[in-house]
Structure formats: structure tokens, C-alpha cells
Image (cartoon, rainbow, N blue to C red):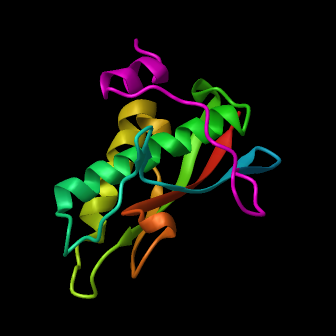
């Protein structure tokens, strides 16, 4: 049976140490056995994945951006939350923000990029409630931002 890290590698990703926040917030807060992960934008080592769904990006590109943001969520859980992925009891909820035009109505399909990665890496404990929103813009021009609420053991 593969570990979550091995499954993440099958997607072609490694967890990387997150950069410290540049504002007055912390990336992860903990209350009891619940972690609240601040919104993570779509980015790679090369920089922020920018775009506007319904204008400069299509659903597939948006889904890929959501996947990248979900990897950032997992990195924050490990590096800022101090929790191994195998210690996740349940991903309770993902909230996905999609930078999109007012006519774009497929935010739910973009959000599938994040959801599919989380479930693919964590299995049944990754199955979660979700909300997906279209927004006019996101920090640094990011295409997608994902936040999470996670129960740990």
C-alpha cells in the first residue's frame, strides 16, 4: 500500500517548505485536533500561476492551478502544522476561490482539480465537503486559491 507521500509523487509533486507569509496571519492554526489552513494560491517554484477563468484560462488549466494550490495546502499541513499526512484523520472541507469572469460558471469543475488531488493522495480520509466561488481577483493575480479544514489524529 502506498503512503500519501508516494501517492503525491505519482502525481509528480513533492512537498516543499512554504515561504513565510508576507502579511499579519499564520498559515495554519490549530484548535484541538482541527487544523485551519489559510488560503494557498496556485504557484510553482517558478512563480504564481496567474489567469482569469473564462478569459485567459480554460477549465483544464484552472483545474491544474487548483491542483497546485492543493499541494500547497498539504505542504502547509506538514511544515507549518507539524503533522504528517498519515496523521490526517479527515479532510473536513475545502474552499476553492477561482478568479473568473462574471460569465464563467464552471468554478465547480476547476475545484475538482484540488478535490481530486486530495482524495487521490489521502484516499477516503480526503473526501470532503466543498465550496467553490468565482471571484474578481485573487492575491498576486493568482488563478486559484484553496483553504482547508482538516481533522488530525
The quadrant holding residue 143 is bottom left
Looking at the rendered image, the quarter that the N terminus falls into is top left
- In the picture as drawn, the residue positioned furthest to the top comes out as 1
| Above/below status of 55 relative to 146 | below
| Residue drawn at x 46%, y 61% as measured from the top left | 145
Q: Position of residue 35 (x, y in %)?
A: 70, 48
- In the picture as drawn, the residue positioned furthest to the front comes out as 46
Is residue 74 among the parts visible in the rendering?
Answer: yes
| Residue drawn at x 47%, y 24% as measured from the top left | 4
Q: Position of residue 17 (x, y in %)?
A: 61, 32
Query: Is residue 42 part of the magenta span, yes or no?
Result: no
Q: Is residue 108 left or right of residue 44?
A: left
| Above/below status of 92 relative to 45 | below
The quadrant holding residue 60 is bottom left
Give whichever of 83, 50 is nearer the camera: 50
Is residue 127 among the parts visible in the rendering?
Answer: no
| Residue drawn at x 32%, y 26% as measured from the top left | 12
Taken as a whole, is the magenta stretch helix, strand or loop? loop
- The total of numbered circles placed on residues is 0
Looking at the rendered image, the quarter that the C terminus falls into is top right
| Residue drawn at x 72%, y 39% as measured from the top left | 81
Q: Position of residue 131 (x, y in %)?
A: 44, 68
Give whichever of 32, 50 is nearer the camera: 50
Range covered by the magenta-colored residues? 1-27
- In the picture as drawn, the residue positioned furthest to the right comes out as 32
Give whichever of 26, 48 is nearer the camera: 48
Q: Position of residue 118 (x, y in %)?
A: 42, 41
Query: Is residue 3 part of the magenta span, yes or no?
Result: yes
Q: Is residue 93 left or right of residue 53?
A: right
Amino acid at each position: 500500500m502506498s503512503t500519501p507521500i508516494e501517492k503525491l509523487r505519482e502525481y509528480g509533486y513533492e512537498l516543499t517548505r512554504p515561504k513565510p507569509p508576507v502579511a499579519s496571519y499564520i498559515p495554519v492554526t490549530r484548535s484541538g485536533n482541527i487544523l485551519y489552513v489559510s488560503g494557498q494560491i496556485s504557484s510553482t517554484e517558478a512563480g504564481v500561476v496567474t489567469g482569469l477563468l473564462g478569459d485567459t484560462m480554460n477549465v483544464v488549466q484552472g483545474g491544474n492551478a487548483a491542483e497546485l494550490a492543493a499541494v500547497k495546502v498539504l505542504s502547509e499541513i506538514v511544515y507549518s502544522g507539524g503533522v504528517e499526512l498519515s496523521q490526517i484523520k479527515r479532510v473536513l472541507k475545502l474552499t476553492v476561490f477561482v478568479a473568473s469572469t462574471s460569465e464563467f460558471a464552471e468554478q465547480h469543475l476547476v475545484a475538482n482539480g484540488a478535490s481530486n488531488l486530495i482524495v487521490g493522495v489521502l484516499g477516503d480520509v480526503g473526501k470532503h465537503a466543498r465550496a467553490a466561488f468565482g471571484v474578481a481577483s485573487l492575491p498576486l493575480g493568482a488563478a486559484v486559491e484553496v483553504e482547508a479544514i482538516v481533522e488530525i489524529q
